[in-house]
Image (tube, grey):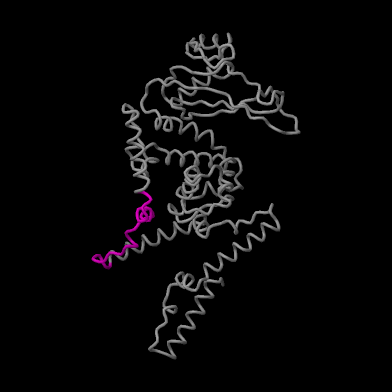
Amino acid sequence: MGVVEIVESCLETAGKQHQAAQLETFLGVAHTEPKTKKQEMGLVETVEICLETAGKQHEEAQPKTFVEVVHSEPETKKQERGVVETVKNCLETAGIKHQEVQPETSLRVVSSDPETKKQEIGVMETVKNCLETAGIKHQEVQPETSLRVVSSEPETKKQEIGVVETVKNCLKTAGSKHQEIQPKTSLRVVSSEPETNWHKLDHLLYLPILGLTRPRDLYYYQGKGLKMLYGFTYKYLTLEHFLGQLTRLQVGYSLADALAKDYSQAWYPGDAPLFIFSDWHVKPHWTKHPSHSGHVTMWERVMPGTKQLVINGPDGHLLGGWNYQVDTHLTHVLVDLEADLATKLQRPIAYNIFDSEGNGLPTAQRYTEAERDYISVLPRNGKRNYSATRY
């Protein structure tokens, strides 16, 4: 028997004994719901303080050891085990039966939905007002450009651009392939309800809004931003496991390809030809193991690394990023990549703009053969003024 059941049983027994001895005296604690009793007795607060204190002592003694119970929110486990969904279904069934017996009586618990809380605490109104203000400023600066996100309700945006359905289908397909290869291994991300996966995805999407940059920042996060949306905040380890399972499914590339068109349309609506900016970001690898090497300009040495090709659209909005070997040259990838990108975005690429690495005869010949255009921006004699040459 757990602590809650023990406390409830003891209170019920003591309440009956009290009522038998003093029938005219009423004790609220004997007639209170178990959860309310915990709050009134300070049990919840006491357990929380004890866990927090014990967690700090554990961190000081063993800073490299992570204990999930120290960093988990009480409500998180309910979501992962499906308790919330079960309660929701039971309430819905009981509500239908109640309406059949007493159709003239309406209970708020029956008519409320999971999104009601957001409305009650004013989160949706705040988000709506912020988007409306930002949309007005955008229209003043660029009156000819219309962004769907400005005119849409915040909760309908994901539905309108097809993100929810796309993510669901990609996870289902990747999960089926994983089960065929490893039938004895089960991943929670595959069997979880879509709502549970979206709660975790939303936590990751909203990190920049909260001033956080990566999941590990949730390790010590104590803010109330995400609690206002879901009533709880996933901690670092839960999201790290979630990302690890997505990595095992190898779902990243399929999701990127499936969402590429919808994502680009959010920034650049329409089907007019799009011009893009391309540039390398060289990431050095510090390792003692043998690895493919190339010249890293930042360190002025030959060393292992990865070249990441980053492509932005007008106004600098990111369209995609690709990893290549550290000695890859723009000549080897750009033309084929542009054709593939145009197919995924379902719109033509007008021309590509990149720096002096592409200013060579091989690049010009490749673009000529493919009948495509590019602009190479070159520094003149080491000065800051630039010239643009179009081929």
Q: Is residue 244 magenta?
A: no
In percent of width and height, residue 292 lies at 70, 26
Residue drawn where x is 50% and y is 39% of the image: 173
In percent of width and height, residue 139 lies at 32, 32
* 12 relative to 24, above or below: above
* 153 relative to 359, above or below: below
Q: Is residue 118 magenta?
A: yes
* 151 relative to 231, above or below: above
In percent of width and height, residue 294 lies at 69, 23
288 to the left or right of 14: right
In percent of width and height, residue 241 lies at 59, 48
Q: Nearer the viewer, residue 41 or 3?
A: 41
Q: Quadrant of the N terminus?
A: bottom right
* 345 relative to 174, above or below: above
Q: How many marks?
A: 0
Q: Nearer the viewer, residue 174 or 205?
A: 205
Q: Magenta segment range?
A: 101-124
In the displayed image of the protein, which residue is found farthest to the bottom?
21
Residue drawn where x is 32% and y is 31% of the image: 140
In the displayed image of the protein, which residue is found farthest to the front?
383
In the displayed image of the protein, which residue is found farthest to the left?
104
Residue drawn where x is 54% and y is 14% of the image: 378
Residue drawn where x is 37% and y is 23% of the image: 271
Q: Nearer the viewer, residue 230 or 10?
A: 230
Q: Nearer the viewer, residue 286 or 179?
A: 286
